Amino acid sequence: MIGAVLTCLVNGVAIAQDKPADQMEILREKARADKKLVVATTLALTEGEAKVFWPVYNAYQSDMIAHYDKLLGLIDRFEKAYDTMTDQTATRLLNEYLALEASHVALLKAYVPRFQRVLPARKAARLYQIENKVRALVNYDLARQIPLVK
């Protein structure tokens, strides 16, 4: 099941370049729903845990969507500048990337206490493992698709 979700998440980024916005949104919603199923299954939430977990997780997902939208914007700017890349543009894009990475880590840290208030510590840690695995596969696919700067 995790493989199917990850395939949808990874392929969704690649397909985004070729599909109209409404079709991309459908793919993103499917990936989110599939990922939510993986999270629910892997965490094996009790009824009480689920009741308090999902609102926090949904807020987290909203923040992560905003983060990945910024990342996709950066990739788009990189693609547009690729053939005419200057040192100044490369420096600007690198700084944007590093700022996004820092904001991602800050976001992860900010949610730890929120998740630990609604989940046992081991389940919170397991959630972060799931999120890390998904991100690693998405990053792998992006790394395969994005060429090195000339």
Image (cartoon, rainbow, N blue to C red):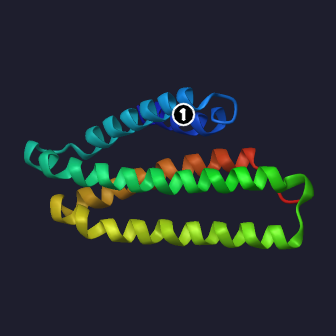
In the rendered view, would you say 150 is above or below 89? above
Q: Quadrant of residue 35?
A: top left
Tell me the element at label 1: helix
Q: Quadrant of the C terminus?
A: bottom right
- Coordinates of residue 11 in the picture (x, y in percent): 60, 34
Answer with left or right where residue 122 lies relative to residue 128. Answer: left
- Coordinates of residue 110 in the picture (x, y in percent): 34, 70
Residue at x 36% of width, y 34% of height:
33
How many marks can you see? 1
Q: Residues within 10 Å of mark 1 (few under 14, many from 20)?
A: some
Residue at x 69% of width, y 52% of height:
75
Q: Quadrant of the N terminus?
A: top left
Answer with left or right where residue 27 lies relative to residue 81. Answer: left
In the rendered view, would you say 88 is above or below 121? below
Whether residue 147 is visible here, answered yes or no, is no
Which residue carries the number 1 mark? 7
Residue at x 57% of width, y 35% of height:
12
- Coordinates of residue 137 in the picture (x, y in percent): 56, 46
Residue at x 34% of width, y 55% of height:
60
Whether residue 89 is visible here, answered yes or no, is yes
Answer with left or right where residue 20 lies relative to residue 57. Answer: right
The residue lying toward the viewer, choosing from 122 and 32, is 32
Give the amino acid type for the residue marked by disc 1 in the picture: Thr
- Coordinates of residue 58 in the picture (x, y in percent): 30, 48
